[in-house]
Amino acid sequence: MAVAGQIAIPIPPVPVTLQTLVVMLAGSVLGRRFGTLSMLVFILLAAVGVPVLSGGSAGLGVLMGPTAGFIWGWPLAAFLIGWMTEKSKNLNGVKLTIYHVVFGVILVHMTGVMWMWLGIGMDGRAALLAGSLPFIPGDIVKALLGSVIALKLHKVLSVPGREKTVTGRGSF
């Protein structure tokens, strides 16, 4: 996650990073418990000043700044993706992509935009235009890529909370 934050295109107020991809992988590969825990530990590291966020940033100021809603949405997204992945029978690329889009894109965008609007007082329309809409196409690509990676990992790893019931050959 820390490395994914350093691969960034700095577009204010929300940089483009690979962190949403890692959130999706945390839930779909590590499962709901470990995926959520990994996100919480990551946020704790950032809170105590370890420079793990985008651009090497850290601290409570960042966790209360314009991007805070996205960051605080990560544990919930990892939990829900992990829960749905564990619960899903015959997991395939379509199902996993849906979980990634609904929880890793839509949910994280909602928490981010809501924070920008209600938490820092940005106009709601401006928050949506600046913090979500430009990022949706890239995040959809990350959801697809995350599904392909996760399915391949499911075939070789023991994923917490689920047996190996991945269908197909990692395809959609």
Image (cartoon, rainbow, N blue to C red):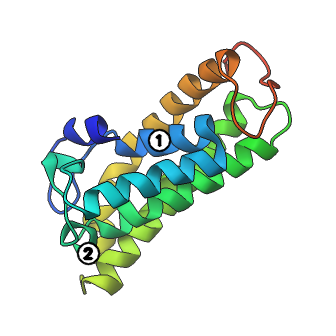
Q: Residues within 10 Å of mark 1 (few under 14, many from 20)?
A: some
Taking the image as shown, residue 22 lies to the left or right of residue 134, namely right
x, y percent for residue 16: 25, 46
Residue at the outermost front position: 48
The quadrant of the picture occupied by the C terminus is top right
Considering depth in this image, is 166 or 9 the residue closer to the camera?
166
Taking the image as shown, residue 103 lies to the left or right of residue 90, namely left
Residue at the image position 34 percent from the left and 86 percent from the top: 118
Query: On the image, numbered disc 1 is attached to which residue?
Result: 140
Residue at the image position 40 percent from the left and 77 percent from the top: 114
- Quote the CA–CA distance across marks 1 and 2: 26 Å
x, y percent for residue 71: 36, 61
When asked about the image quadrant of residue 119, the answer is: bottom left
Residue at the image position 23 percent from the left and 58 percent from the top: 14
The quadrant of the picture occupied by the N terminus is top left
x, y percent for residue 56: 14, 47
Q: Residues within 10 Å of mark 2 (few under 14, many from 20)?
A: some
Under mark 2, the amino acid is Met
SS for dot 2: helix
Does label 1 or label 2 sit earlier along the sequence? 2
**How many numbered tags mark residues here?**
2
Considering depth in this image, is 54 or 35 the residue closer to the camera?
35
Residue at the image position 14 percent from the left and 59 percent from the top: 12
Query: On the image, numbered disc 2 is attached to which residue?
Result: 64
From where the camera sits, is residue 10 visible? no
Taking the image as shown, residue 168 lies to the left or right of residue 16, namely right
Under mark 1, the amino acid is Ile
x, y percent for residue 152: 61, 18
Nearer the camera: disc 1 or disc 2: 2
When asked about the image quadrant of residue 44, the answer is: bottom left
